[in-house]
Amino acid sequence: MFRAILNAFRIKEIRNRIFYTIAILALYRFGATITIPGVDANAVMGQVQSGMLGMLDLFSGGALGRFAVFSLGIMPYITASIIMQLLQVVIPKLEQLAKEGEVGRRKITQISRYLTVGLSLIQSVAMVFYFRNFGAIPKFDFIHVFMIIVTLTAGTTLIMWLGELINLHGIGNGISLIIFASIVSQIPGQIISLFRLKTVNIIYLIAIAAIAVGMIMAIIMMTQGERKIPVQYAKRIVGRKVFGGQSTYLPLKVNQAGVMPIIFAVSILLFPATIAQFTNVKWLQTLANMLTPRETGGINPVYAVVYTILIIGFAYFYGAITFNPNDTADNLRRYGGFIPGLRPGKNTADYLSNILNRITLPGAFFLAMVALLPEVLIAYGGIPFRFGGTSLLIAVSVALETMRQLESQLIMRDYEGFLK
């Protein structure tokens, strides 16, 4: 691994990409520390210590607690992406654009950007009026309110642009790395807070560390796990040459959707609960209480059930988007490939669909378990440690994906990569 790191830094192009990514993430972290003028950050900090606002603060890297320029974080963009992917299923025009290749994807991305700006504007207005009730905005006049709303909206737009810059000139997925940087930046403060608790002894800390290491190992195993479907290619004679006749396999990952079901589920839970907290409507307040992760005496069962259903549903939904059995079966038939014992075409597609459904279910349950286990430990252990399973899963998955991309860059230059 260390030899691969040295080889990566010896190549000028990869070294520049790594430094470019680090510089963009440093710029993002800098923007997450700049408090917007005219805001009392102490009053805001008192409201984001727990609940959904606490989770929003975690995913923004502490920016919400400071009411910084990047307080909204990247969640509006993720919500916009979810909406666009759902609309592709129900709107034929968007589905057609998605199948038009790079040109269609650019148009969908452009629509997602505009939708992100609109969602950021709505959330900025709601946030301003919500924190006004706690004295966070001493001068509540048009100039100050307008400046805060524009700053928050522009902050999210800038984060979206920084993520795309990483995609173009850096290493890894820009949006995922920004979420990764936000989560990891909170680890030192969370650990310090944990050690300051007088009720926590060394044995308890060792147990928590052992659980964290075990979860990381389980996440890596589940992320790397795959079902290999054998594929045989028929021999073809073109002139005097024989093509094909080789055996290979089609890898189907157990966790086909990766970390996206967790991010989607969190976004769906955060959006209505956040809007509910920013209003005085009674039924919205009731909804916010129902979607609170913890309640008096333990974990909220409604939150646990809804969270689990959303994760499982999005695991199947995103898995169907990333892997289409019908298209895969058609491609195999087109290039002379077949699964032994199955006819090409519909039989192959049905077989692949059945296998995908069977391996997606345990993967989805694993995601739900990892996401809920720390909440259970926090609720019944009494430790205010917000860096839980969701954050751990996102951090580990993003790190593995970034390592894979860096490995691919090294393999193209005949260097041994990170992953064997």
Image (cartoon, rainbow, N blue to C red):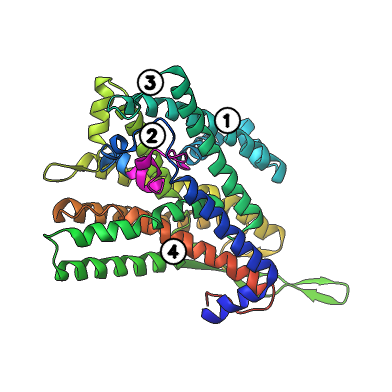
Q: Nearer the viewer, mark 2 or mark 1?
A: 2
Q: Amino acid at mark 1?
A: Ile
Q: Please give the name of the residue rendered at 23% of the width and 34% of the height, measured from the top-left corner.
A: 290
First along the sequence among labels 2 and 1: 1
Asked if residue 3 lies left or right of residue 284, the reply is right
Name the N-terminal-most of marks 4 and 3: 3
CB contact under 8 Å: marks 1 and 3: no
- The dot on residue 91 is 1
The label shown at residue 326 is none
The answer to whether mark 2 and mark 1 are in CB contact below 8 A is no
Residue 2: image x %, image y %?
Answer: 52, 79
Q: Is residue 205 left or right of residue 364?
A: left
Q: Residues within 10 Å of mark 4 (few under 14, many from 20)?
A: many
In the depicted structure, whether residue 21 falls above or below residue 245:
above
Q: CA distance from mark 1 to mark 3?
A: 42 Å
Tell me, for residue 271, which label it has, or none.
2
Tell me residue 406's x, y (percent). Answer: 59, 67
Inspect the image, locate mark 4, and give the three-letter code of the amino acid beneath it: Thr
- Provide the residue span drawn in magenta: 55-74
Per the image, the residue denoted by label 3 is: 140
Mark 2 or mark 3, which is nearer the start of the sequence? 3
Say if mark 4 contacts mark 1, CB within 8 Å. Answer: no
Dot 4: element: helix
SS for callout 2: helix
